[in-house]
Image (cartoon, rainbow, N blue to C red):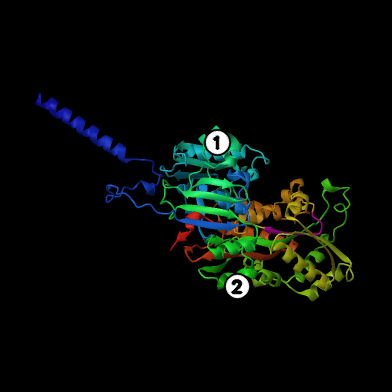
Amino acid sequence: MEKSKYSWLVILLVIGLAFAMLVSCGPATQPDDPDDVDDPDDVDEPDEPAEPTEPVRVTVAQNFGVNSWDPPQDWATVQEWTTQNAYDYLFVRSQDGAEWVPELAYDWERIDELTVRFWIHDNVRFHDGTQLTAEDIKFHYRRIIDGTRDQYIVVDQYQWIDEIVIHDDFTFDVVSKEPDSLFFYKLAQGNTGAGIVSKAYFEEVGMEGVHRWPMGSGPWVLEDWARDEYIKFVANEDYWRDPPGYDELVFRVIPEASTRVAELIAGDADLAYMVMPADEARVEAAEGVRPVWSKTARGFQLWPRLGVHEDYVGEPELDREFTTEDPRIREAIERAIDKYGIRDLGGGEGEAFRARMFQPLPEAHPDLYGPEANLYDPDRARELIAEAGYGPGEARLVFHAANTWPQEDVARAIGDMLEEVGFDVDLRILDDSTFNSEVYWPRKTQELILLLLGGQMNPFFGTLSYEPSRYEGTGYGGIGTAPEGMGELLEIAWTEVSDDERRIQAYHDLSMLAAEHRMNIGLFQESVLWGMRDRIEYTPRVPDSDIWGYDIKVVE
């Protein structure tokens, strides 16, 4: 009997040890969620009644408002930086653009050339209190992939995804169709529509409902808005990270730059975006405010037409020989322009560039950014025009630009410089709406068009326009023929995921090829002048210039 009793004790002990070992063993590759660590010093104290206080508000004066609250429906820069205050992303770029910063995903791992596994926080809730899980992320990406261009302007940017595999509520894989070195850029913030919308909310209200009102998990909850007037957020007190450091964030839509400055000086705005350089002294002299210059990830550039597209055969202005088909003329255009001279019209500190990517990206060719990228040589420009067979005033350039500031001023200065070396410039300044609908979007450009394009600190946007099928195809208006070898270099740059040196070299080579062929003629990196009240601290973001209310600190 004693022996039997002893045997049962041994069995129970063995079972207990086995159970303890089983509990202690989890998935070997799953990292710890940093938000799951309990603080032993956290002890609930009885709440004491607080004295009622006025809410602390930060007001931003900007030139545009919100068209849609659904992130993939509109990727305009000001539009996105406003809406993204209500949303979270898997990860974001750091303020200087040098690294990835975890957000919803606290960790990730490349499993193979096609697959990246993500682990997301388990304490994230949408503004309606429902929990954010991997199903929401899969649903958000999937609806874009399966959508149309008319529904989601970013639809083409998501076709690289093959499938999204969910392992549990907080672990999932994103599988690409081929190795993709731009994987992370495409799922982060910055004109990608990647802010996560609640699946349940979308299924309840549909695309039109999300278009009118957001349901994200971000640090700010929309309280009220009026199109082209204002947007009012209140702090998300249940935010999964520390809640914002103040109570209300208001964006006021004030198209006129001088009025934004007046509101700033009067104390009715704390942060004014895109102050005119002529108003810098006015801000400097006012009490309690200061001017701040910052570089942006946008750049001014000229895009020349290099050939007739089949869709425009029979249209007199588009079915003809373009002066810019001659590479000597394209070089003469670049040699005629003092890039720093036109930059200084608007002040600022942006550098000259030639291709389309900026430092400090390692993918950006160092010889195509900075003083070496300013090829200003008017005498050589005149020689090139003569070598192309034109006398003074014979080489005609139809040149389109929008009437927004500073595009119109930059275009007029460029026109003067081109005429100075002997071009006959037909400068056509159009109102912004007509420019976009009649020239830019249908790509009905003639010799030249002036554009201010973003994404130069993102190798995806910085090279997408060079892809031969887009550059030559109907969807891009048939600007011309891509130089030989461009497609092969892009293939390496976009798909090399294991050899960084080979990938970066491919970017350098293709950027140099684009610059030598002058697929576009880079001018200068845009700088923006901000006005800020002394009651706030804010450092403008270099990668995207986005205004994140979470990053604004109230110091009064």
Dot 1 alpha-carbon crowd within 10 angstroms: few under 14, some 14 to 19, many 20 or more: many
Q: Whole-percent x and y of residue 38?
A: 31, 47
For label 1, the residue is 202
Identify the amino acid type marked 1: Phe
Q: Residues within 10 Å of mark 2 (few under 14, many from 20)?
A: few
Quadrant of the image for the C terminus?
bottom left
Residue bearing the label numbered 2 = 281
x then y, percent, for residue 93:
52, 55
Q: Nearer the viewer, residue 25 or 196?
A: 196
Q: Is residue 156 one of those drawn in magenta?
A: no
In which quadrant of the rendered view does residue 344 lie?
A: bottom right
Secondary element at tag 1: helix
Is 5 drawn above or below residue 362 in the view shown? Answer: above
From this viewpoint, is residue 219 visible? no
Helix, strand or loop at label 2? It is helix
Residue ID at (69%, 63%):
406
Q: Position of residue 61 (x, y in %)?
A: 58, 58
